[in-house]
Image: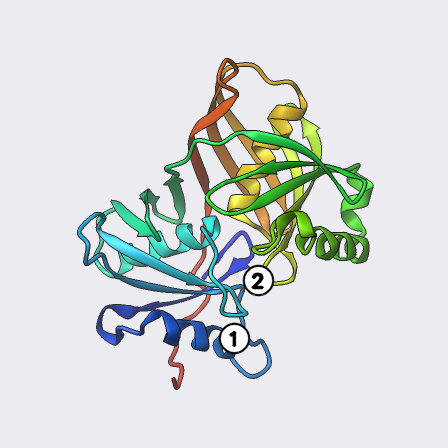
Amino acid sequence: MHGAGNDFILFDNRALKLNNEELTQLAPAICNRKFGVGSDGIIALQFDETKKADLVMSYKNPDGSDAGMCGNGARCFSRYAVTLGSPDRFTFRVHDKIYEAEVEDDNVIISFPLSTKVIEKSIANEAILDIYTNTEHIVCPMIVEELEQSDQLIKKGRLLRNHKEFYPKGTNVNFISGIESDKLCLQTYERGVEDLTLACGTGAIASAIGWHFLQHGKSGNFFYEVKVKGGTLYVHFSFDDKKAHYHNIKLEGPISFVYSGEYYY
């Protein structure tokens, strides 16, 4: 499946019951685009034995590492769950956080249990915004022409992603350029993929919040359109300028089924 070009391998882990170590070992093999299937990550679906949510989404990066959250992966996971019999609205857990999914055919909205703020920093002589979206992200403002220079973005993304300021976890790096007050372009260098991806859901959230912040946005409810290489994502949020906090955060966008098959584990 893919969400705006962010592609994932999903499987039903309710009967397989692969544990965390087995998922960690599986990811690099199956995500390899030459010797495996190829994807930006794997997602295992299972019941939540803690009963805190309806389902659990277990996500692994292509290198086998954990991510705090994957927004586009969550949207694909939610649509996949419906094909397995889930209702159109349900809850799912990622690590210790509970998310809500709303599936409208191939359009999926994820509500994030998240209140966040923007932290201004200077890293490697670069003015950046540090914005946590249940996983680590920084936002780098650029002019639109710079977003087309993929080699330079990869070089800069790798430098910032591995900077000592973010040790030991590292961070995801979002390069943005504003189009209108509520529209922006985005390219993301993703940790774990170690390259630019066609879309990043949690990166889109961080970028929309960052663009609002850069415009000295006031309190209110907002809806942002984020254009990525793989399509368009939409971010909803509320902002309280007295507390300088962003909340009521939702990620919306399309998903697509590409194919199904068997993998000889």
- Residue at 23 percent across and 68 percent down: it is 14
The residue nearer to you, when weighing 149 against 135, is 135
The residue nearer to you, when weighing 167 against 57, is 167
- Whether residues under marks 1 and 2 lie with C-beta atoms below 8 angstroms apart, the answer is no
Residue at image mark 2: 192
In this rendering, would 197 be left or right of 238?
right
Q: Tell me the element at label 2.
A: loop
Q: Which mark is residue 175?
A: none
Mark toward the start of the polypeptide (1 vs 2):
1
Q: Which mark is residue 28?
A: 1
x and y percentages locating residue 255 in the rendered image? 45, 52
In this rendering, would 48 be left or right of 219?
left
- Residue at 81 percent across and 44 percent down: it is 146
Quadrant location, the N terminus: bottom left
x and y percentages locating residue 100 in the rendered image? 31, 41
The residue nearer to you, when weighing 8 against 211, is 211
Quadrant location, the C terminus: bottom left
